[in-house]
Amino acid sequence: MNIRHERPDPALAFLVQAPLLLHTSADQSHAVRGWSPEGFEPPEDWPAETPPCATLSIPFQGVFVSFEVALAQDGPGGFVRFQGLSGRETQVLDLFHGAILRGEMAPVDGILKALDKPVDLVPMTRTEHDAARPPARAIPRALRAGAVAALYGAAAVFLWGALWSPAWERMNSIPLQAGRIEAMEPPRAAPAAAGAARTGPALVASGWIDGAHATDIYLGMAARLRVNVDGALVVLPARVTAIRAEAAAEGPARPGYTIRVAADAAAVADGPALALRLRPGGAAAIAVSTPILPDLRKAAGGLCGRVLGRTCGAAGGLDRVPAALPVVPEPPGPHPRDPGRARAVAPDTAPAADLLVAYDPLDLAIGPLPDGD
């Protein structure tokens, strides 16, 4: 047995003894042993002058895989190197060389992949083709920054409109259920203390809300009234004018409140025409603005339970409490739009406690709705 120790070089330098056929001419071929993907050691019958090119044949399961190679020798009797190999040819040599080193047979599909797969090596230096092409003009940095800022701005607008806007609307308003138009009230004079008069008819609508969500609703609270007029959605600013405790009309009996709002129909450009096209009983969408004050709401509910011995909140303050407590109105502020206040005073037998509910001085209806209204 002839044991040969190879020097500790990279895997490409390990020489294997499996024979390759190298055809240097039409009638002359050499069996090459001791080869690697880099080249081979010249056999004993190798000519003194190395030919510039030859045909390399690799035996594979009774057939030969052949391709042209360029040869270059490192001096007389030195190592002969392969030159001008394409990416596919290099892959075929690597495949056979690695299979022999691992002691396994190269599979057929591996040969086909190595021959068919476009594995041409990417040149790491500038080629003549690259040098012939004109240099590309770079976009100015300021223009690129502006384009990126515009893109992010458009994405922010989209996200705000599609995602954050409904979430913000959900957190800052309370929608009422079963909204309907009740009547178009004629212009009315405001209280003397307000010093102003209505300038147009009031569009009155009402809706129902569950009692669990009514603790943030009070008289004079800002609201939005949406009505469909000839296929067009009209949004009118409104105010809460009355609150009445009433159970749900449909489904299981649930405690809740009927909220009445009044909107100034003259606030829109076609106020008179709007009044003519709206009919009582039509559908309406009502939403009241609400401050997010969960801690104050809990504190107010606890105060009512300890002082008045009943469950109440901002929505029920002028609905149930005035039935047993005197209500003392207070004049509004110096500005015509300053809200007035109605103070529900606790009896002398209970600790001092006041419930304040703001209302708009331009709204006349303060307190619960009369029965049958």
Image (cartoon, rainbow, N blue to C red):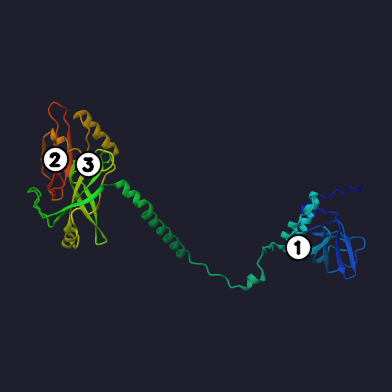
Q: Earlier in the sequence, mark 2 or mark 1?
A: 1
Q: Residue furthest top?
A: 349
Whether residue 8 is visible here, answered yes or no, is no
Mark positioned earlier in the residue sequence (3 or 2)? 3
Percent position (x, y) of residue 27? 90, 70
Q: Earlier in the sequence, mark 3 or mark 1?
A: 1
Q: How many marks?
A: 3
The residue at 82%/66% (across/down) is: 71
Mark 3 vs mark 1, CA separation in Å: 85 Å
Q: Which mark is residue 257?
A: 3
Mark 2 neighbour class, 10 Å CA radius: few under 14, some 14 to 19, many 20 or more: many
The percent position of residue 357, horizontal first and vertical second, equals 18, 41
Q: Secondary structure at mark 1?
A: helix
Place of residue 261 in the rendered image (x, y in percent of width and height, measured from the top left): 19, 49
The quadrant holding residue 259 is top left
The reply to whether discs 2 and 1 touch (Cβ–Cβ < 8 Å) is no
Residue type indicated by callout 1: Glu
The residue closer to the viewer here, 312 or 252, is 252
The kind of secondary structure element at disc 3 is: strand
The secondary structure type at the circle numbered 2 is: strand
Judging by the rendered image, the residue that carries numbered circle 2 is 342
Q: Can you tell which quarter of the image residue 74 is in?
A: bottom right
Q: Quadrant of the C terminus?
A: top left
Identify the image quadrant of residue 229: bottom left
Residue 65: x %, y % from top left: 80, 63
Q: Residues within 10 Å of mark 3 (few under 14, many from 20)?
A: many
